[in-house]
Every structure is written in structure tokens, then in C-alpha cells.
Amino acid sequence: MCPAEANPETKPSRLDPPKVTRRSFLSIASFASFLAAALTAVAGMLRLPKPAVLPGPVRRFKIGFAEQFAMGSEIRFEAENVFVFRDAEGVYAVSATCTHLGCTVARAGSGFECPCHGSKFTEMGNVTAGPAPRPLPWLEIGRAADGQLVVYADNEVPAGTRFRV
Amino acid sequence: MATTVQKPAESATREFLQNLRNLPRGLKDACFRTGRLPESEREESQATFHNLFLHIHSVRVHVRTLAPTLTYGLGLISAASFLILCITGVLLMVYYKPSTAMAYDSIKDIHFVVFTGRFMRNLHRWSAHIMVVAVFLHMARVFYTGSYKKPREFNWLVGLTLLVLTLALSFTGYLLPYDQLAYWAITIGANIANSPRELTDALGITQWLDPGGFQKRLLLGANYVGEDALIRFYILHVFILPALLIVLLGVHFWRIRKDGGLARPEDPMGGHAEWGGELRRVFEPLATKTYGLMAVVRGQRPPVNRGPENTVMSWPHLLWAELAVLMFTVAITLALSLVSDAPLKELANPAIPENPAKAPWYFLGLQEMVSYSAFMGGMLIPAIVWVGLALIPFLDRKPAGEGVWFGTPGETRVVWQSLAYGLAVAVGMLAFTVNFGWLRNWFPGIHQLWIIFINPGSIFVLLYAGWSLWILKQRNSVRLAAVALFTCFLVGFIVLTYFASVHRGPNWQFYWWPSQWPVH
């Protein structure tokens, strides 16, 4: 117990906590509520530009029937930025979007090359040169109800995953 | 004010007619309070502080402020080109349509159909270039004259923020034509904003913490450059960034005045003052002697009739100087716009990247570093350099050498040495990477974290910082260490920018000249 309370006659020490009057309590409280309201409003305003829906091209598209892909063939789907390959094990799709800064890679030799900053990839998409931080992603392939193959360009699958046909 | 007193009108009709006759004079008096150009110094000071636009000036300025070789008017050139940008920008907004379907065509309309449209667009383009150049040079001027020192630290920070805003304005403007160059430069820019993901991916924490993805989506409103990105860039370019820039520009100007005008040494004229067209010695009382009035007056007369600190009236001296700089800037911009057209490539095509897709020239130094690793080169190194610049006035606090070009003893020498060192490091590193490649060429299986952090740019920063520390120890001066660092970064910036502009071609490969690029 502090001495000021034990004996009301004792002079209050300067170490005692300052007395909070009702007036100052209310003014602090009202200021705090103003601050809380202002912060909430600002937070709401800042939250608005963060998109809730990401508009963009459809990232799921049919590529035709499995029989259309001859053994050892490769087809580039230009609008969708995807290469589709067919080998003995099945059909697989590799994204043509460079993992560095989003340029579109082109076929060069047996692999891929990016025109923007010179990243090079093997046929399997692994980085061999340049600044690309990740291999080119392999994309999921499925079969639609009508029997056509579908590439799900937003769904990455582990490299080497093929769709058996 | 000085209206002739006429006989009081006898009737309301006559009074009305008389007032009608006096209308031109009445209008003039209402607009211009003094009614004529100021003649005395008192009226000149009133002209300054009675006018909303002029009262940002102090009434008197130091004569040194007006010396062209102190500032080369670089800050004013920046502001003047911003003024041109605002005017031409609003005119371009009349026809520009911010939608992916119409943006490109509206730029073509502006270029080929709209009366003076092409000229306005050229002016906008050229004054943007001039503004960026002038802002960089202005920063160098303030640095090399030591004008950031106490009490001007805050204004140095405001200036650095203005630099960022200037670059952001030109970056956002780059997308608006929606041509190939715009599309791919912004795709690259947005993916640089996305590049913290390189780090979070390498650490395997992207699914919990993804600042890169957040930044990219905030910028583009989507995962790809499209309608949302164009609208966002448009809002930033025509409203948010200019509004911020105007406010900060006001603060910047205001603080120049409140911090005591342009930085200058304690006694810039060496105890002299200009009086009657000649320099005279200012009276300096000896500390040990007591003077009667007669003693003070006799001998070397103190210049009367002249401010004790060599100041002159802002109206008209400063005003004329400012108008001259404005006219100079307008003249240069006009001439360039008549000679050279702003470029416009083909319509944006997301399927085929522009090759090479080069950012505007002032970002090419960054692009060169980005071509080794995006996060370090595009975000971390610029952030480190910016913070380093911001810290300068707080680390270098000795007032010596203020307001004089290379004013610290030994500074010129350090500048030359740092120029040579910075040049050698930059050219040497670039020659090395062109000839021998970089990490992945030597260690194909190297961990991504090494690729991210060991960027040639990081080596630059380390070597430059090391040089600066060596100067700090060797020359025993914080200012000289700052000079060494600033000079090195300036040289590095120029070399990288030059190298990426001239010597990088398709696939970001090295070519001696653009004429050697393969035809495709």
C-alpha cells in the first residue's frame, strides 16, 4: 500500500501515479474511440484495392483428342502459352511462361530460351542458365466429358507427371 | 487605388452609368491591389507577400542563390518540366481512353488525327525525360554542394521521396499506350513486384507469407496485365501520384525557405558586400577595441543601402531568374518535340514478347541487375541504395563545406578517385559476366538462395561500401566517405544504364552495337 493512502495527512509523493479524473478519462476514451474509428476507416479504404476476384483469361482449355497427338510430337498453344508433348509414357503440358519475370519462352535446340533475360531451360523445364528461380511448371491434364483432353493451366503438377492415354 | 475622384453623381442613373464607365478600372483595381508594377523596395516586398503564388518566396534572397553556377537551375527545371507535364497531360486526357480495347487506338488518334495531338504527346514524352534527368542532376547538385546538411535533412528526405514519385509517374505512364513495349515492360515490372516470391519460394513459406503476390495483385488487380491493370495505372498516373507530388513539391519549396534559403557558407563573400556595383569590405569591429560613433563611420565605410547579408529583392530578381529557367525548359522541350516523335510500337500482344523488352532508360540499370536475379536486383538493391541516400544527412553532420561545390578540403580528389574506382568496378564486373557468365554457368545445381543474393549488383554494393569505409578510415572524414559512396553509385548507375541501353540486344545478349542485332 502506498503511504499516501495509509495516512491521508502525508504529502503525496511525486512518484505516485497521477490521479485520473473522470474528465481526463472521458477525454482519453473519446480520443481513443476517434482514433479507432479513423484507423478502421483507413484500413477499409486500403483493403479495397486488394482484388477479391482475379480477372483474367480462362486458364482451362481443351486441346483435342488424345489420338491427335502423334508419338513424339509437340504442339505449341500460342494464346494459352503452353507446350503439349506426347511421348511413350503419355501426354504432358509445360507452361511457356518464364518463371523469372513472366516473358514467353521459345523453343531453342532441345530446350527453351527466354527472350527477355536469357534464362535457358531443358526439355523437362529445368533451369540451366540465367536468372529464372524455378523450373518451367508442368500443368495438369485431364479428360473432359466429350473425351477431349483438357489442360488446367492454373494447376501445377510435379515435373514428369504424364497423362496416360 | 489611384482612381480619380469624380464629382458625386446626382441621380442613381448617373451613378450607374458612371460606374459602368469605370468598370475596366474597377476590375483592374479588384484584381491587382497596387494597380501598377512595384517601384520601391517596400512595394516589391508587398508584391511578393501579397500574392498567393509568390509568397512562397522570401522577400529577399541572397545574391549567391541567383548565381547560375551554384544550382544550374536544376530544381526549377524539374518543376518546370512537371508543369509542362501537367498541362500536356490534361490535354492528352481529353482523347485518351483507358481501356485495353481502345487505349492503343486512342493514342493513334492523338498521334495522327487530333490537331496538335502528336506535338502534345511529344512534349509530354520529352518533358518526362527532362524531368527525370533534371531530378537526378538536382540530387547530385544538392549532394556535391553539401546542401543536405543540418537543418536541411528533412528536405533531403522529401527530395528522395519526390525522386521515387517521379520514377513511379513515368513507370505508370509507360503502360498507357498499351503497345508491345508497354505490355511487356509492365509485365516485367509487375513480376519484379512479385519477386519476393523467389525468396519465399526458396524458403518454402509462400503459402503462408506471400508479399510478392500481394504487391503484384495490388498493382495489376489481376494475375496478368489487362483491363484492371490499365485502369489502376491510369488512376495512379493521372491522379494519385501527381497529387502526392504536388503536395510534396509544395513542402519541398516551403522548406527551402524555412530552412534559410539555399545552403551557403557562413560568410560567402569573405567579409565583403556589393555596394554601388563594387565589392567593399564590410566593417568588422575589432573585439579588443571600443568604438565611438565617429570611429565607426570613418575609414572603411560599412556599405549602407544594402542588406547586411548580401541579399537582393526577390521581386524582380528571383522572379526573372525563375521565368528564365522556365522559358529555357520550354524552349528545349519544344525543340526536342519538333525534332523527334514519341515512339509507338505494335498493339500489345500477350502471346509474343517484345525482344528485347526494354524498360525506359532510367530503369535499364535495374533491368541489367534483374537479369541476374529479380528480387535482389529489382527490389533489395534499390531499397538499400535509397536507404543509404536517406541516411547521409544523419551520418554526416559537420557543417563544413556547405553550399559550395566540392567544398570540403580534399573532396575533388576523392571524387576523381571514386570516379576511377567506381568505373573500374562497374566495367570490370560487366566485362567479367559477359565473358565468363554468372553462378549458374559454373555451378548448374546451385541452390536458389545463392542465385538470389549473389547478384553482380550485390558485389557492386559491397565493393562500393568497402571503398567508402576505406576512405572513412584513410581520410578521417564522414563527408569524404559519403562523397566516395555517392560518386561510386552515380558512376555505377550511369555505367549500368549505358550498358543495358546500348550493349544488350535480343535474349538480353551482349552486342557491341544495336546494328549487330540479328534480324528476326
Image: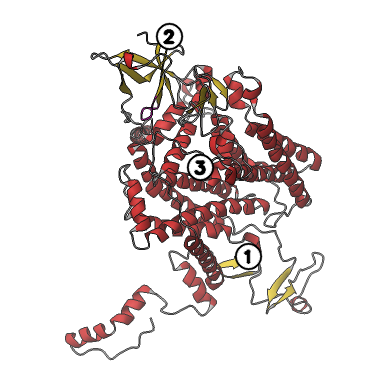
Chain on which label 1 sits: B
Q: Residues within 10 Å of mark 1 (few under 14, many from 20)?
A: few
Instruction: Write the residue at 43% across / 9% down.
Output: A88
Residue that label 1 marks? B68
Residue that label 3 marks? B359
Give me the C-alpha separation between circle 2 and circle 3. 43 Å
Residue at disc 1, secondary structure: helix
* Dominant secondary structure (helix, strand or loop) of the stretch shown in magenta: loop
Residues in magenta, as a range: A76-81
Q: Position of residue B386 (x, y in %)?
A: 58, 40
Q: Is residue B413 left or right of residue A70?
A: right
Residues tagged by mark 2 and mark 1 found on one chain of the structure? no
Q: Is residue B504 left or right of residue A27?
A: right
Residue that label 2 marks? A88
Q: Is residue B257 left or right of residue B280?
A: left
State the residue in front, B310 or B219. B219
Residue at disc 3, secondary structure: loop
Task: Identify the coloring.
Answer: secondary structure
Q: Position of residue A34 (x, y in %)?
A: 34, 36
Residue type at numbered disc 2? Ala
Q: Quadrant of residue B488?
A: top right
State the residue in front, B337 or A10. B337
Chain on which label 2 sits: A
First in residue order: circle 1 vs circle 3? 1
Q: Of circles 2 and 1, which is in front?
A: 2
